[in-house]
Image (cartoon, grey):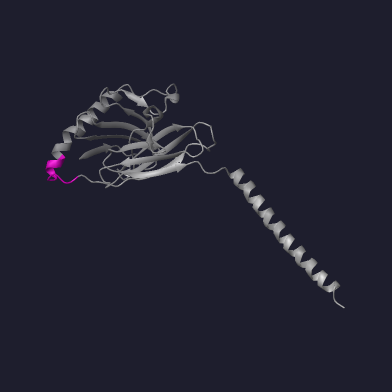
């Protein structure tokens, strides 16, 4: 069972939302602050230190010094309330929502140019999911993979993204597999580099030219046959 709570903004106010969620597993919890649906930071559930999602903006603003205390209290409240809420509701089964996934490159892909593949997993609950990558059927190096925290959706489902750094090579096929308690089998997406469009354009042009030349040849041949028949008439 998971339990979340937060403070929704008043109508017309800035969409700043603090959220904490925890599961009945020691050390398993998350406290984050979101703005306009995007995560600004999260608080590590073990050290209670704030980790900014975009470190490049760290010099532009400083988190509230009391944030670690707020996170400690919020996560503690969740852990305290989970068994009591479950007992009060006669231990209902945990809601399970089947995730969806998308797989796409971060930038336009070119052979030999470093890029990043993104596996976006959305609408899942509970927020526990395993994401694995393969290249040509073989597991990739874990050092090439990074992953976000769980983000909350307005319906209290979650989303998460996994990133794979790679260099596109002709013939390579990548896969992203999502394993979740709601799935009977992992949800797998595949990606491979599309054939170069310029090369396709050249092939198409050559084919069209060949067809046109063939038609011209046929027409010319028919014209010569007709002319030859006319010249042999008495």
Residue positioned most to the bottom = 234
Report which quarter residue 133 is drawn in: top left
Q: Which residues are magenta?
A: 85-93
User: Can residue 217 be seen from the camera position used here?
Assistant: yes
- What residue appears at the point 30 percent right and 27 percent down from the top-left corner? 43
Looking at this view, is 12 or 154 the one in front?
154
User: Would residue 164 be found to the left or right of residue 77 on screen?
Assistant: right
Q: Residue at x 26, y 41 (%)?
A: 126
Q: Do we see residue 35 in this rendering?
A: no
Image: 234 above or below 55: below
Residue 73, how many percent across, how many down? Answer: 22, 28
In the picture shown, does residue 47 fall above or below 2?
Answer: above
Total marks shown come to 0
Quadrant location of residue 121?
top left
Query: Measured from the top left, where is residue 120 in percent x and y?
Result: 39, 40
Work out whether residue 154 or residue 200 is closer to the camera in this orientation and state it. Answer: 200
- Quarter of the image with the N terminus is top left
Percent from the top left, x then y, of residue 194?
52, 43
Q: Which of these two is toward me, 2 or 9?
A: 2
The quarter of the displayed image where residue 208 is located: bottom right
- Where does residue 36 sit, x and y in percent of width and height? 40, 38
Between residue 204 and residue 157, name the one nearer to us. 204
Where does the C terminus fall, quadrant-wise? bottom right
User: Is residue 86 found inside the magenta-colored segment of the image?
Assistant: yes
């Amino acid at each position: 069972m998971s339990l979340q709570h937060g403070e929704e903004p008043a109508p017309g106010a800035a969409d700043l939302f603090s959220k904490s969620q925890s599961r009945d597993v020691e050390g398993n919890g998350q406290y984050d602050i979101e703005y306009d649906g995007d995560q600004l930071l999260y608080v590590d559930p073990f050290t209670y230190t704030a980790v900014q999602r975009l470190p490049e903006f760290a010099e532009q603003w400083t988190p509230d010094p009391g944030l670690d205390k707020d996170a400690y209290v919020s996560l503690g409240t969740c852990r305290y309330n989970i068994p009591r809420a479950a007992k009060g509701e006669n231990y209902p089964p945990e809601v399970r929502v089947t995730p969806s996934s998308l797989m796409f490159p971060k930038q336009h892909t070119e052979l030999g140019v470093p890029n990043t593949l993104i596996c976006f997993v959305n609408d899942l609950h509970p927020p526990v999911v395993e994401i694995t990558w393969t290249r040509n059927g073989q597991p990739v190096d874990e050092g090439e993979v990074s992953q976000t925290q769980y983000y909350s959706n307005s319906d209290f489902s979650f989303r998460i993204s996994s990133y794979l750094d790679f260099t596109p090579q002709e013939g390579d096929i990548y896969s992203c597999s999502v394993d979740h308690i709601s799935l009977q089998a992992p949800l797998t997406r595949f990606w491979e580099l599309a054939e170069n469009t310029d090369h396709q354009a050249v092939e198409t042009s050559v084919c069209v030219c060949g067809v046109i030349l063939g038609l011209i040849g046929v027409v010319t041949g028919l014209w010569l046959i007709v002319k030859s028949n006319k010249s042999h008439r008495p």
